[in-house]
Every structure is written in structure tokens, then in C-alpha cells.
């Protein structure tokens, strides 16, 4: 409920549509309510007195009112739909923008499956609820109240029937709406699990096939899908049970109306047309109550959805930007970590412990260490994908939190461990690095990343289309393109997170050579499992269990670091594949 109230501000720009929808609906309802009374007049006056002219005149009047009602219904649908669709579009836009601003920790706290359900299912439920509210929620109560008033005024003798039937109908609606609201909340949660599983399976389809683990994957999907089916069935069952119960109550009311009406007609205090009109109004009342209850259910169903949407919109972005970022002259590229501690979860165990080191502009720092020792985590802190728990990171002597995220990130070229490319052309992917990159800049970038050869081999070179996840490229080609995307920014700081693992030794040597030539002023942070990739670094950090076990040049570390010596020993003989 609170979530929905929070979202109502999104209707403001579409106020006019939101007012016109119900207004047109009032016209339709007024015409619907008029019909049984005209019919009663035709029966009790026209037919009873054999007055053909009266019957034709009021018959035409009935047709005219039906036509005006039709216009009202169409107008209402048009404006209610416009209001609801635009309302949902604006929320979807803001949810998307918000998730774009999320820190990695924010995104992980939701999970991508849940975020997808929010942008798709939840928003569809909210849009539907608003559309029905603007159309049917006006129509239902108006039809109901109008019928009750008309019966009170024209068939007061039969009113006791309503006094019994209406409270029973209203209690039924209340009970079923509350119940279905709760059950639809569970449906959304089950939907999250299905979306998460589906997303994981599609992303890892190659692994699933390679391991022939389709059966295992199927059984996992079947479990979450069965859970969704169960939740859906119990929620829908509640909705579908309501209609027959209400029909049953109305049918009893019709019989009671006929019985009471027959007595009154025999007594001479009631005309037959009034009984017919009463039965009609009973049906209209049922119609009004049913549509109100459907909307009520749709609205209660949308409450959990609205809360989840609000949860995204109200999420505090962990990476707070400075209110007034200081204007720095362009970033040069000195990096310093001062006693940095970091944990992925609040109050969790530190993954990085007391990290301190310094690297000057134009220097290269290599990072090596065992799996899970914290190498990738360390470099993720530089573009503020996460913030340290304690300690600080400085660039050019200024804490990175003092820079606007835009200024900071535009100075950094980041090549992640897993090359993530987007569907579109090669050119599109390079534009992610620099929006206005020229052809000459693209050529330099791909040449430096040893990607030129494979791109030129395509008939359509830069306009070659990549499939989703760039599945039509090899692992090495993806890494080269991912590097080109970082190089094209002409970054002041270049972070290479084990990004040459799938590249042959010769190409890697070429990349390192071009780095020195093309980006002599760029500070390079390079993570590699191979000593050959970092042997010439100005400084090498040896990571072990979240800490810097040793730091120095290759020549120093082979003497001072036991861990480095062990790695060197296992790779000895390979390091001479490096450049120079
Ligand atoms: N998003 C995350 N949430 C929680 N824990 C994480 C997350 N990413 C990494 N970790 C944990 O942090 C620790 C350090 O991981 P990190 O990826 O930095 O290691 P690494 O040295 O780069 O390993 P590798 O050489 O295998 O890439 C590991 O114990 C890992 O399980």
C-alpha cells in the first residue's frame, strides 16, 4: 500500500488522462443505469396500454442511450490506457536509471533475477491495476450505488432483498481480496526464482552442454517452475472461486425478489415491469460488485509489486558522490592505497586486509598471487565498483571519493577478467569505450590490442555483428576486443585483470610492446597468473589471503618472497617469452 502511494506521483504528468478516463466512464455507467428503467416504462406504460408509438419512441431512446454509453466506454478505455501506459513507462525508465547507478553491492543485494521480475512482471501488474482502477473501479461502484439508489426509489417493496444480499456479497469480496493479495505476493517471489534460474541457465548454456548436465539443470528448473505453478494455482483458485459464490448469492436474491414481487403484484401494490427492472438491477449490481472485486484484487495484487519497485527506487546508492565535486585538473595517474580493508558483506570477513602501496604515473604495477587472494577485488576498488570499509585510495594525492564518478571513471580503462561484450557490431562495442571515437582512434586501439588482424579478416570488419554474449568470437578474440575498448579511451590508468589469459604468448608480447609505445604516460595495473606478463613491472604485489605478502621488482622478489619464488619455480623457463 505504502509502495503504491509512493508511486502515485508518477501519475501527475498524466493527470488529464487520469481524469478524462473516469469521466467518460461516468457517461457509460449513467447510460447503463438508464436502460432497465426505460425498459420498465416500455412494459408498464407502452405494452400495458398497447401504445405502439410509446414503445417505438422509448425503444429508440434505449438505442440512443446504448450508443452514448458505447462512446463513453471507448473514450474511457482510450484515456485510462494512455494514463496507465505512460505512468508505467516513466517508472520503468526510472527503475532502469536507478539500477544503472547501483553499486555492485546494491545489485548483488537484489539479484538480477529479481530486478528483471521487477521491471517486467511487477510493472505490468502495476500498469494493469492503474488501468483497471481508472476504468472499472469507477464503473463498478457507480453501477452498484446507482442500482441501489434506483431500486430504493422505484422498487422500495423489494429493497429488503438487497439488505440481506449486499452485506453477504461485500464480505465475500473483502475476504477473497485480502487472501488473493497475500497469495499473489508469493507468486512474485516464485517468479523471481524462475527468472534467476532461467537467466543462469541461458548464460551458462555452453557449460551445461559441455558437462552434459542438461538433466540436472532441467530438474532444477522443474522444481522452481513447479513451485511457481503451485503458487499461481492457489492464487488463481481464490480469484475463480469468488465468481460462482457471488452468482449463487445473486440467484438466491433473484428468487427472493420474484417471490416477494409476486406477493406484492397479487396485492396490487407493484407492477410486473418493476420486478423485471429489479432483476436487471440485481444483475447490474452483481456486475458492479464483481468488477470492483476484480479491480480490488488486481490492486491488492499490485501492492507487493509496488513495494518491490519502490524498494529499488528508494535504495540508497552505496557509492555516494560528493555534493560539490572538486574541479581537478585532469587526472595524471598516481595511485596510492592507504591501509585499505574491504569486505563484500557488511561486518563480514575482510577480503582485503591492510593494503598499502603506491604507484606513480606511467609506471606499471603487477599483481600476482593464488586464486581467491583478492587480486580482482583490489582493482575493482580503483574505479569505485566497491568502496573500501576502512582506509583510503588516492589518485594524484586526492581521495577518489572526492572525484565525481564520471571524472574518475573516464580516466580509467578497465579490462575485466571475463570479457563482457554487447550484442551489436564491433564498432558499437568500441563506442562503449569512447562514444565519439573516430575511425583512426579505433584503428590505433585495435592495433595496440592485437585485435586488428582478426577484425580485418571479417568481410564487414568493424560492422561485423556480435551475437549476444559475443558467442561468435573466440575467447582470445573477445579479450582483445575488450582490451581495445579500454585502450580507445586513452586512459590515464589502465587496469588489466588477467585479461591476456586466452591470448597466445606472441600476441601478448605485442600488446605489452604497444602499451609501452602508445601509452607511455599511462599507469598500468596488471593482474596475471603468469610471471612473464609482469616480470618487467616497476613494482609487483604478491597477494596471499587478502594481504600483500611481498612487494618489489622481479629481481627483488625472487630473493625476498617465498610465495613468489614458488610461483617462479613452477613457471621457470616461461618468463623469457615476454617482450624485449
Ligand atoms: N561479489 C562477491 N561477493 C562476495 N564474495 C566475493 C565476491 N567476489 C569475490 N569474492 C570473494 O573474495 C575473495 C577474493 O576474490 P577475488 O576475485 O578478488 O580473488 P582473485 O585473487 O582475483 O582470484 P582469481 O585469481 O581466482 O581471479 C574470494 O574469497 C571470493 O570468494
Image: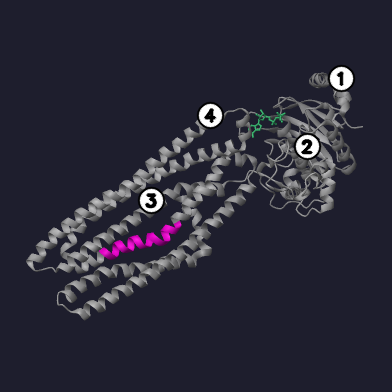
Front-most of residues 107 and 451: 451
Q: Residues within 10 Å of mark 4 (few under 14, many from 20)?
A: few
Tell which circle, 2 or 1, labels the residue nearer the N-terminal end.
Answer: 2
Tell me the mark number nearer the camera, choosing from 1 and 4.
4
The quadrant in which residue 472 appears is: top right
Q: For the residue labelled by badge 4, is the local secondary structure a helix, a strand or a loop? A: helix
Q: Which mark is residue 559?
A: 1
* Quadrant (top left, top right, bottom left, bottom right) of the C terminus: top right
Mark 1 in CB contact with mark 4 (< 8 angstroms) = no
Q: Position of residue 10 (x, y in %)?
A: 52, 58
Q: Earlier in the sequence, mark 2 or mark 3?
A: 3
Judge left or right: residue 219 versus residue 332.
left
Image quarter for ligand 1 equals top right
Residue picked out by circle 3? 297
**Residue at mark 2:** 496
Q: Nearer the viewer, mark 2 or mark 1?
A: 2
Amino acid at each position: 500500500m505504502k509502495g503504491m502511494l509512493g508511486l502515485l506521483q508518477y501519475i501527475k504528468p498524466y493527470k488529464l488522462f487520469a481524469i478524462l478516463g473516469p469521466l467518460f466512464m461516468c457517461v457509460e455507467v449513467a447510460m447503463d443505469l438508464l436502460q432497465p428503467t426505460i425498459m420498465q416504462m416500455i412494459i408498464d406504460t407502452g405494452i400495458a396500454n398497447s401504445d405502439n408509438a410509446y414503445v417505438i419512441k422509448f425503444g429508440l431512446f434505449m438505442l440512443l442511450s446504448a450508443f452514448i454509453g458505447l462512446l463513453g466506454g471507448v473514450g474511457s478505455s482510450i484515456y485510462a490506457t494512455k494514463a496507465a501506459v505512460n505512468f508505467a513507462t516513466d517508472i520503468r525508465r526510472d527503475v532502469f536509471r536507478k539500477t544503472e547507478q547501483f553499486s555492485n553491492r546494491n545489485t548483488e543485494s537484489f539479484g538480477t533475477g529479481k530486478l528483471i521480475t521487477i521491471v517486467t512482471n511487477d510493472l505490468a501488474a502495476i500498469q494493469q491495476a492503474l488501468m483497471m482502477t481508472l476504468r472499472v473501479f469507477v464503473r463498478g461502484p457507480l453501477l452498484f450505488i446507482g442500482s441501489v439508489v434506483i431500486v430504493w426509489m422505484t422498487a422500495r417493496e423489494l429493497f429488503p432483498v438487497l439488505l440481506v444480499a449486499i452485506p453477504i456479497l461485500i464480505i465475500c469480496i473483502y475476504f477473497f481480496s485480502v487472501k488473493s493479495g497475500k497469495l499473489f505476493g508469493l507468486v512474485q517471489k516464485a517468479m523471481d526464482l524462475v527468472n534467476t534460474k532461467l537467466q543462469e541457465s541461458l548464460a551458462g548454456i555452453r557449460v551445461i552442454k559441455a558437462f552434459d548436465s542438461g538433466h540436472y539443470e532441467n530438474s532444477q528448473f522443474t522444481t522452481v517452475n513447479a513451485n511457481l505453478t503451485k503458487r499461481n494455482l492457489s492464487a488463481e483458485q481464490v480469484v475463480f472461486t469468488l465468481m460462482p459464490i457471488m452468482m449463487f448469492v445473486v440467484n438466491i436474491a433473484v428468487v427472493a425478489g420474484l417471490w416477494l414481487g409476486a406477493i406484492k403484484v397479487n396485492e396490487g401494490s407493484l407492477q410486473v415491469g418493476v420486478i423485471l427492472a429489479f432483476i436487471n438491477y440485481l444483475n447490474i449490481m452483481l456486475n458492479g460488485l464483481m468488477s470492483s472485486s476484480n479491480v480490488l484484487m488486481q490492486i491488492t495484487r499490485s501492492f507487493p509489486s509496488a513495494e518491490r519497485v519502490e524498494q529499488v527506487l528508494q535504495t540508497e546508492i552505496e557509492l555516494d558522490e560528493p555534493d560539490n565535486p572538486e574541479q581537478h585538473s585532469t587526472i595524471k595517474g598516481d595511485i596510492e592505497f592507504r591501509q585499505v580493508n574491504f569486505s563484500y558483506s557488511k561486518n563480514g570477513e575482510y577480503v582485503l586486509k591492510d593494503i598499502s602501496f603506491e604507484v606513480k604515473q606511467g609506471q606499471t604495477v603487477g599483481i600476482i598471487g593464488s586464486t581467491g587472494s583478492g587480486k580482482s577485488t583490489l582493482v575493482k576498488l580503483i574505479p569505485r565498483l566497491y568502496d573500501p570499509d576502512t582506509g583510503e585510495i588516492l589518485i594524484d594525492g586526492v581521495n577518489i571519493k572526492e572525484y565525481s564518478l564520471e571524472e574518475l571513471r573516464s580516466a580509467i580503462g578497465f579490462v575485466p577478467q571475463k570479457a563482457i561484450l554487447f550484442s551489436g557490431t564491433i564498432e558499437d562495442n568500441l563506442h562503449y569505450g569512447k562514444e565519439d571515437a573516430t575511425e583512426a582512434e579505433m584503428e590505433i586501439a585495435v592495433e595496440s590490442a592485437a585485435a586488428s588482424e582478426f577484425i580485418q579478416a571479417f568481410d564487414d570488419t568493424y560492422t561485423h555483428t556480435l551475437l549476444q554474449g559475443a558467442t561468435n568470437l573466440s575467447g582470445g578474440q573477445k579479450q582483445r576486443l575488450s582490451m581495445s575498448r579500454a585502450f580507445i579511451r586513452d586512459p590515464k590508468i589502465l587496469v588489466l585483470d588477467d585479461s591476456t589469459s586466452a591470448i597466445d604468448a606472441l600476441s601478448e608480447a605485442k600488446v605489452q610492446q604497444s602499451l609501452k609505445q602508445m601509452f607511455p604516460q599511462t599507469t598500468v595495473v596488471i593482474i596475471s597468473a603468469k610471471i612473464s606478463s609482469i616480470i618487467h613491472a616497476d613494482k609487483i604485489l604478491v597477494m596471499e589471503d587478502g594481504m600483500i605478502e611481498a612487494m618489489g621488482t622481479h629481481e627483488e622478489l625472487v630473493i625476498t618472497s617465498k610465495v613468489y619464488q614458488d610461483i617462479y619455480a613452477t613457471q621457470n623457463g616461461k618468463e623469457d617469452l615476454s617482450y624485449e
